[in-house]
Image: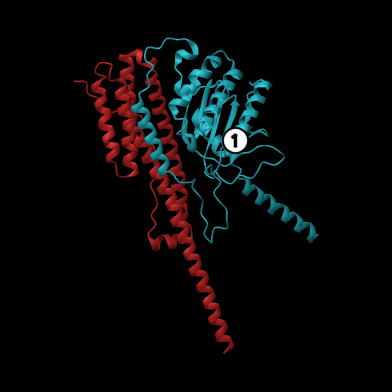
């Protein structure tokens, strides 16, 4: 009789500990997943910020003849690709394209109109653009950091079991796309 | 014998515990630690002691009035980092600015690379957007820095930054200071600039953008805390918050965080 009740108490105790740790692990995973998603949205935020700066840039240089319409077309295309990107990898590729498209266009504009470099508004926008680049780089780094922590966490025992049961998937890393160094094709006809 | 053993074990455990607590990220990353005065860290030894005192007292006064922290750092070399990365990492590691308000600013100058960069914490990106920060450097500092007059250049820039923060908090800036928004290049160096009108449309669009960014941004990312974790938080440069008070009467960071805002110039 006494033995039985001890066993029952022990079983209950083990069950409580087990359930408690399952809940704890689950909540911990949810929390860190939120962290990853938050840093992911920060990247999109900054990409959007940059995309929004481009029309301002155009407005500034519009007074200067045709503001290099040919090279600008590549910018608008790359911009659209960034907005349309669904996955982290797609976004990385598209924004790498946009990076170099902007570079080419800005270079073309300043080469054609060197006086722009002294234009206060131009300097301001140039500073904003490079600030946005920095923010994007940092947001990616933060995302990778939190994604790595999360990915390691869901692979560790015993959380791996809980992650498996509740379907926590690992996140892709935001790696510099292959196209980062390559220059997008720009046609001049 | 066993007593000695116990002592050794406990000392070892204690050291391990302390090491894990203070996160040796400083040694790993190669960024300097803050000096005791915290607000002015002249590692390149280029700031006159008078100027240093002035910057320090103004930064302390600003901190008392607004909780914002403006930190000046000079180094000889950036060790291969980009200026913005270096300034941002210092801001995060030192926890410059209030933890809730993220209102820290790091003014970094390196003598080898001849770069200056002002990193602006999340909470002040609205008051000091990148373009304005860049203009502060252009108007107040560059001419001095180009002539190797680092001390005056930094003092002028720091003054301007501090005054802009005062204005942001609705306080009166130092006597004689006019907000950079109402200044033109010709006011400062008499250079004739053909186009000086700042488009209000652009300013408003930028402001809206900044506010949307604030809305989407939550607090700094926090580590895991489940029952199997034993309470060891990750040691990476993520953990912006929770720095203890500096002790020994020195100043210290409040735990503010940075996201890449700011502007820099070569000189």
Residue A74 spot, x, y in % from top left:
26, 28
Residue B19 spot, x, y in % from top left:
64, 47
Question: Which residue is painted at 42% across and 53% down in the image?
Answer: A33
Q: How many marks?
A: 1
Q: Chain A is shown in which shade?
A: red
Q: Please, which residue is most extreme toward the right here?
A: B1
Q: Please, which residue is most extreme toward the left here?
A: A189
Name the subunit of mark 1.
B
Q: Quadrant of the N terminus of chain B?
A: bottom right
Task: Look at the picture and state if A74 lies above or below B141.
Answer: below
Question: What's the coloring here?
Answer: by chain
As rendered, which of B86 and A53 lies closer to the eye?
A53
**Quarter-of-image position of residue A169:** bottom left
As rendered, which of A171 and B116 lies closer to the eye?
B116
Question: Which residue is painted at 35% across and 32% down in the image?
Answer: B205
Q: Give the left or right position of residue A115, taking residue B4 as reference.
A: left
Q: Secondary structure at mark 1?
A: helix
The residue singled out by tag 1 in the image is B65
Q: Give the left or right position of residue B13, taking residue B178 as reference.
A: right
As rendered, which of A81 and B243 lies closer to the eye?
B243
As rendered, which of B112 and B106 lies closer to the eye?
B106
Q: Give the left or right position of residue B193, taking residue A157 as reference.
A: left
Question: Among the chains, which one is cyan?
Answer: B
Q: Give the left or right position of residue A3, taking residue A133 as reference.
A: right
Task: Look at the picture and state if A103 lies above or below B5.
Answer: above
Does the image show residue B15? yes
Residue A94 spot, x, y in % from top left:
31, 36
Mark 1 surroundings within 10 Å by alpha-carbon count, few (fewer than 14), some (14 through 19), many (20 or more): few
**Quarter-of-image position of residue A82:** top left
């Amino acid at each position: 009789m006494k033995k039985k009740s001890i066993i029952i108490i022990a079983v209950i105790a083990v069950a409580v500990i087990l359930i408690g740790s399952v809940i704890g692990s689950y909540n911990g995973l949810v929390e860190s997943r939120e962290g990853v998603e938050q840093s992911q949205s920060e990247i999109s935020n900054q990409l959007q910020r940059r995309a929004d700066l481009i029309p301002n840039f155009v407005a500034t240089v519009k007074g200067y003849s045709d503001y290099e319409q040919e090279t600008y077309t590549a910018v608008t295309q790359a911009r659209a690709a960034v907005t349309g990107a669904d996955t982290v990898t797609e976004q990385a590729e598209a924004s790498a394209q946009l990076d170099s498209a902007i570079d080419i266009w800005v270079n073309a504009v300043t080469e054609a109109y060197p006086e722009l470099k002294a234009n206060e508004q131009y300097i301001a926008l140039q500073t904003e653009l490079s600030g946005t680049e920095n923010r994007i780089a940092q947001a990616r780094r933060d995302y990778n950091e939190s994604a790595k922590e999360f990915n390691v966490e869901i692979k560790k025992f015993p959380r791996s079991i809980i992650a498996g049961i509740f379907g926590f998937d690992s996140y892709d890393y935001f790696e510099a796309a292959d196209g980062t160094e390559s220059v997008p094709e720009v046609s001049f006809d | 014998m066993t007593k000695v053993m116990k002592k050794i074990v406990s000392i070892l455990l204690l050291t391990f515990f302390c090491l894990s607590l203070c996160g040796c990220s400083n040694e790993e990353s190669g960024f300097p630690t803050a000096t005791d005065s915290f607000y002015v860290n002249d590692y390149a030894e280029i700031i006159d002691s008078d100027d240093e005192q002035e910057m320090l007292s103004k930064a302390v006064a600003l901190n008392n009035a607004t909780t914002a922290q403006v930190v000046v750092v000079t180094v000889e070399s950036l060790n291969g980092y980009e200026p913005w990365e270096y300034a941002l990492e210092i801001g995060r590691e030192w926890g410059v600015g209030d933890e809730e308000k993220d209102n820290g600013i790091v003014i970094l100058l390196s003598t080898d690379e001849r770069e200056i960069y002002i990193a602006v914490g999340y909470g002040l990106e609205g008051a000091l957007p990148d373009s304005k920060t860049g203009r502060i450097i252009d108007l107040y500092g560059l001419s001095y820095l180009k002539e190797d007059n680092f001390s005056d250049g930094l003092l002028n820039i720091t003054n301007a930054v501090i005054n802009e923060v005062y204005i942001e908090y609705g306080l009166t800036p130092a006597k004689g200071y006019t907000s950079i928004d109402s200044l033109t290049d010709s006011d400062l160096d008499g250079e004739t600039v053909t186009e000086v009108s700042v488009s209000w449309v652009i300013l408003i669009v930028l402001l809206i953008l900044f506010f949307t960014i604030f809305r989407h941004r939550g607090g700094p990312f926090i580590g895991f805390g489940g029952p199997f974790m034993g309470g060891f938080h990750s040691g990476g440069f993520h953990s912006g918050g929770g720095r203890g008070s500096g002790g020994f009467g020195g100043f210290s960071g409040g735990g503010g965080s940075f996201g890449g805002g700011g502007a820099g110039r070569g000189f």
